Amino acid sequence: MNQDYIIPNAWSILEEGFEEDRVKSSESIYSIGNGAMGQRANFEEDYSGETFQGSYIGGVYYPDKTRVGWWKNGYPEYFAKVLNAPSWIGIRVHVNGESLDLATCKSVTNFRRELNMKEGWLKRSFVAILPNDAEVKVQSTRFLSLDHDEVGAIKYEVTPLNQDTLVAFTPYLDAGITNEDSNWDDQFWQTVSVEHEANRAFIRSHTMKTEFHVCTFMLSQLFLNNIEVKTDLKINSTEKYIEFTQETHVNKGGTASLIKYGGYTVDRDHDKDQLVLAANKVLDTVSEIDFEGLLEKQKEAWQKIWDMADITIEGDVKAQQGIRFNIFQLNQTYLGTDAQLNIGPKGFTGEKYGGSTYWDTEAYCIPFYMATKDQEVARKLLTYRYNHLEKAIENAEKLGFKDGAALYPMVTMNGEECHNEWEITFEEIHRNGAIAFAIYNYFRFTGDYSYIPEKGLEVLIGIARFWQQRATYSKEKNKYVILGVTGPNEYENNVNNNFYTNYIAKWCISFALENIEKVKNGYSDDYNRIVGKTNISSEELSKCKDVANNMYLPFSEELNIYLQQDGFLDKELVTVKDLDKNQRPINQKWSWDRILRSPYIKQADTLQGFYFFEDHFTTEELERHFDFYEPFTVHESSLSPCVHSIQAAKLNRMDQAYTFYLRTSRLDLDDYNKEVEEGLHITSMAGTWMSIVEGFGGMRVKNDKLSFEPKIPEQWEAYSFKINFRQQILKIKVTHKETTFELDGNKSLNLLLNGEEITISPSS
C-alpha cells in the first residue's frame, strides 16, 4: 500500500491533518532549495517527536573515512558526505511561557502544509492548544531566494485565539549539528567564532579535513499587527550556538510575527576572511527589499523557469502534479549557474548517497537540462567531467590500469572515487560509458561539435583506453570478454559479460576512434595538441579497434535475445507476477545472497542498452527483449520505471507506459519504495521528464532533425511541453486528434512528424 495523504493539485503539494508518523516523509517531500543550498522541511519551532534534521550547502562535503571489515588494494579511503550544515531556520516559540511543540500540544487541528511549486514557497498553518490551554493559530511561510541564492526568508506568525498572550520568539543559529549517516561519529565542523551585532548573528565555522569555510547568519525582526516592534534583545550564546529572544504582548485575535532572514556565505564564493562582511551585504540587500518584495521576486524568478520547463497535462491532476513536482525539484537542486556543482541523487533533501555525482547526471539529467535551458548548462555538466579527467586517470591507475586509461568514479565530489562497496566501486564500470554517451548525446541534440575537439576527445580517449585494457581475449570464444562486473542491475554482482557493459564498451571505443579521425581531418591544431598530450599511437588505436570489432555479446539462439550476462538462463526463472507480494520490496525482505541468485532485475539493464542505442536495433528486437526482461524487473531502483515507460510507449503499449509514468512521476509523492523519509530521488526525476517527452512525445534526433512520434494516454485530454532546440524554442501540444507546433525563433525549422518531414515557421 503506497502512502496517499498528498492531496492532488496541479500546482501545489498539499497535506492536511497532523500525523506524527508521516513527519519525516513530509520533511523530504516538502524540501526546498535554490541550486546553491537546500533544506528539509523541518519545523521552525521546537519539535520533540521523530524528525530528520537537514540543511545542506552545494559543494560542501566531508571525506568520512570508509568503514569496512578489511582493506582492499585500490579501495577509496573515504565516502564523501554532503554535510548537515549549521542550522539557521530555528525559531523557538513560547506562549505565556509554554513552549510550542506539536508533539506535546493537547491538540493540533487545521494543520495544512503547502509547497507552492508555481511560486517557489513553503507554507504551514495549524491551530494548537498548548499544555497551558493557550490556543493559538500559527502560520509560517518560507522560501530560499533564487535571485539572492545565499539567503532564505521565513515569516512566522502567531495569533492567540482564546486569550491575551505574551508571545516570545527565540530565533537562533546552531552549529552543534551532526550527520545521521556518519561512519565514525567524527566531528565534521569546527566552530571559529560566534558573533552578533544589533539584530544580526553570525557563526563562522569550517569543515574538518576539507576546510570549507562557512558563515551561517541571521537577521530577525519582530512585528505586532504588521508594525515593527523595537524591543530589547535577550542574547544567549555558547561556543556553537547563539539565540535572540524578543517578546510582545498580543491581544486575543492580534498577530505577532517574526521575519527571519538567514543563510550561508561560503569561501567558494568569497575570501574566507570576508564571510561576515559578505553576509552583512546580502542581509542589507534583502532587508531593504523586505519579505514581501523578496517573495514577489521569487515568484517572478520561478515564472521564468516554468515558462520554459513546464509540462502541462489536461484531464489528469495526479499526473500533472507528479511531473511538476519532478521539474520543480530538479530546478531546486541544479540551475546551471555554477560549473563546480552537479546533481546529487538526493539533491538537498537527505544524506543518503552522499550528495555526490553519479552516472545519473549523464544518463538521465543532461537531456532535461539540455532541452529546458540554454545548451551552455549541459556543456557545463560535460565540462565538470573534463575537469576531473586527471582524477579519473588516477582512479584507473589505483586499480592497475596505465598509459592514461581513465575510469570515472561511481561516486564523487572532486573527481576522486569515494564509493565504499567493492561490488560497485570496482565492478560497476559501465558508468564510464555514460560519460562518453553524454558527449555524443550533447552533440546529437545541440549540433555543437566544438566541445569534442576542445575537451571531449581527451575524455573519449581516456575511456577507450580503459575499455581496451579491461577487456580480456578469450581463446575459447575467439572474442574479447569483460569479466567480473556489476551492470546497471545491482541485484547481480561479479558477473561475466554483462550485455550492457560489453555493448557500451564496444560503442565507446568505436565512437572515440570515429572522432579521432574527425578531429584529425577537421581540427588539425586541436588534433596535434591532443596527440601531444595523450601520446595516442597508431598501434594503440589498432588494439582498440580490434577489441571493439571483436567484443563478445552473450546471446541465446533459442530465445533469439541477448542475455543480460553469461549464465542468466541458469537461474530459476520465476517472474515477478508470481512472486508473493509480501516479499516486496525484496531489497528489504530478502538476504543479499538470495537476491543475487534470483532472476530479479533492480532496473533496466539489457533494456538500458536498448534505450541508449535504440537506432542500433529494430522495433521487433526491442519487443522481444522487453517481453523477456520486463517480467523479471522489480523496479526497485528509481531509475527503472522511466526507461520502461519510454520503451512501452514506443511499442504502443500505452496502458503499461502510463502505469510506469505514474510510478516514476509519483515515486516519492506516493512513496513506492517505502524510503522517502531518507530523501527524494532527484536524478530519476529527469527520467520522468523523458518519459513524457521521449516516451509519449516520441522525441528523437534523427538525421540531424528533431523527430516526433506522439502518442497520448487515454487518461489525458492533452499535454504540451517546450524544447530549446539549437536556440529555437519549440512548443508541442498533443491531443487525441492532432499534434500542433509553435516555434519561437527567427527561422523556419524542418522536423519529422511520424516519419514525414514538415516545416514549422516562427509564430511571430
Image (tube, rainbow, N blue to C red):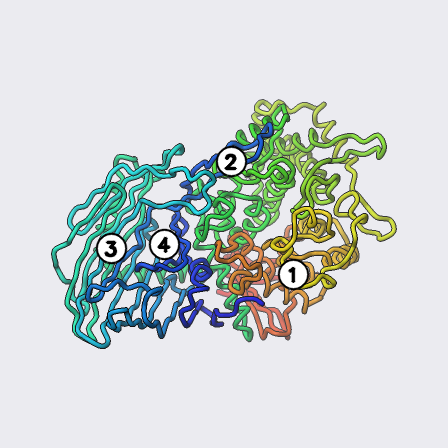
The residue nearer to you, when weighing 1 against 742, is 1
Circle number at residue 171 = 3
How far apart in space, not on screen, are marks 1 and 4 (Cα)? 33 Å
**Label drawn at residue 66:** 2
Q: Which one is in front in this view, the residue at disc 1 or the one at disc 3?
A: 3
- Front residue of 308/352: it is 352
Q: Could you tell which of marks 2 and 4 lies nearer the N-terminus? A: 2
* Residue found at the far right of this picture: 558
* Distance in Å between CA atoms under marks 3 and 2: 37 Å
Q: Which sits earlier in the primary sequence, circle 3 or circle 2?
A: 2
Q: Nearer the viewer, mark 3 or mark 4?
A: 3
What residue did someone put label 4 on? 146
- Identify residue type, mark 4: Leu
Q: Residues within 10 Å of mark 1 (few under 14, many from 20)?
A: many
User: Where 674 falls versus 111 (above or below)?
Assistant: above
Q: Compute the Cα span from label 1 to label 3.
A: 47 Å
The residue positioned 44% from the left and 59% from the top of the image is 24
The amino acid at mark 3 is: Pro
Q: Separation of disc 2 and disc 1 at Cα?
A: 37 Å
Considering only order in the chain, which callout, 3 or 1, is on the residue closer to the N terminus? 3
Looking at numbered disc 2 in the image, what kind of residue is underneath it?
A: Thr
Q: Are marks 1 and 4 in contact (CB under 8 Å)?
A: no
Tag shown at residue 645:
1
**Residue 581 locus on image (x, y percent):** 67, 64
